[in-house]
Image (cartoon, rainbow, N blue to C red):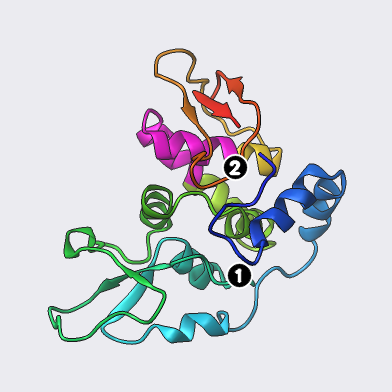
Amino acid sequence: IFFRPRNDPYGHTMSLCKRIQSRQWSNNLSNSRRSACFFPKPPAWLQEVTHPFVPVGWASIVKALRLNCPRPFEPLVIRQDHDISRSPPDGWRLLPDDYALEDPQSLEDHFMIAMQFEGPNLCVLGAAIKHARHGQLVAETIRALVQASREEQWCRRLWFLYEWMSEDRLDVDDLGDSVAYVDVLDATEYYTGRPILSTRHGVRDN
């Protein structure tokens, strides 16, 4: 995994991938445990969302953890009421009402929605992993998701990316060959390389 997504004109993901590939990533990760990786207020781009819409997926994770991340490509919102006369902010994508969350504060639900409907966001995931205050919460959240949904494709991708970026092995058993392998990144959205099988996660690291 090295190249930026085709739909990322600003190259945020590519920049982060280069950091990950460099040896500086490990040093930066350990040093960040002692530094503040959060801000008193969410990023300004989250202010684009007003009632009756609320952010979900990666945007909600940025808001909940107060991460300093650029705006995701086509971030997601859901509608809190049934007033269909109002449209979501420009550049935001509205999920159907079927995806209303029982617990809007659930990080597990937002990771699930993010991976299912937006795909991987290495910038947000990397910032969440490095978060000095909430890094352990993120690890526990992903571990719970893996234990509950380990055979789901989106979950296997998240599991692999978390362990690859954090260099932290979660306390869960290997998946083995019980499922069909899936690519970590969608080759139609990202520039990918020669895949390497990860039997632990049931994915092809491309």
Residue hosting label 2: 162
Tell me which numbered mark, 2 or 1, is placed earlier along the sequence: 1
| Residue name at image x 55 percent, y 21 percent | 200
23 sits to left or right of 4: right
For disc 1, the marked residue is 67
**Measuring 36% from the left and 82% from the top, which residue is drawn there?**
89
Given residues 24 and 191, the one toward you in this image is: 191
**Residue span colored magenta:** 142-162
* Whether label 2 touches label 1, CB < 8 Å: no
Within-10-Å neighbours for mark 2: few <14, some 14–19, many 20+: many
Residue 2 position by quadrant: top right
Q: Is residue 29 above or below residue 46?
A: above
Q: Residue 36 location, x and y as percent? A: 73, 70
Q: Type of residue at label 1?
A: Leu
Q: Residue at x 53, y 35 (%)?
A: 184
In the figure, is residue 122 to the left or right of 98?
right
Q: Main secondary structure of the magenta part?
A: helix
Q: CA distance from mark 2 to mark 1?
A: 17 Å
Three-letter amino acid code at disc 2?
A: Tyr
Residue 116 forms part of the magenta stretch: no
Point 55% across, 26% down: residue:
204
Label 1 element class: loop
Image side of residue 178 versus residue 142, left or right: left
| Up-down relation of residue 180 to residue 13 (above or below) | above
Inspect the magenta stretch and tell me whether residue 150 lies in it.
Answer: yes
Q: Secondary structure at mark 2?
A: helix
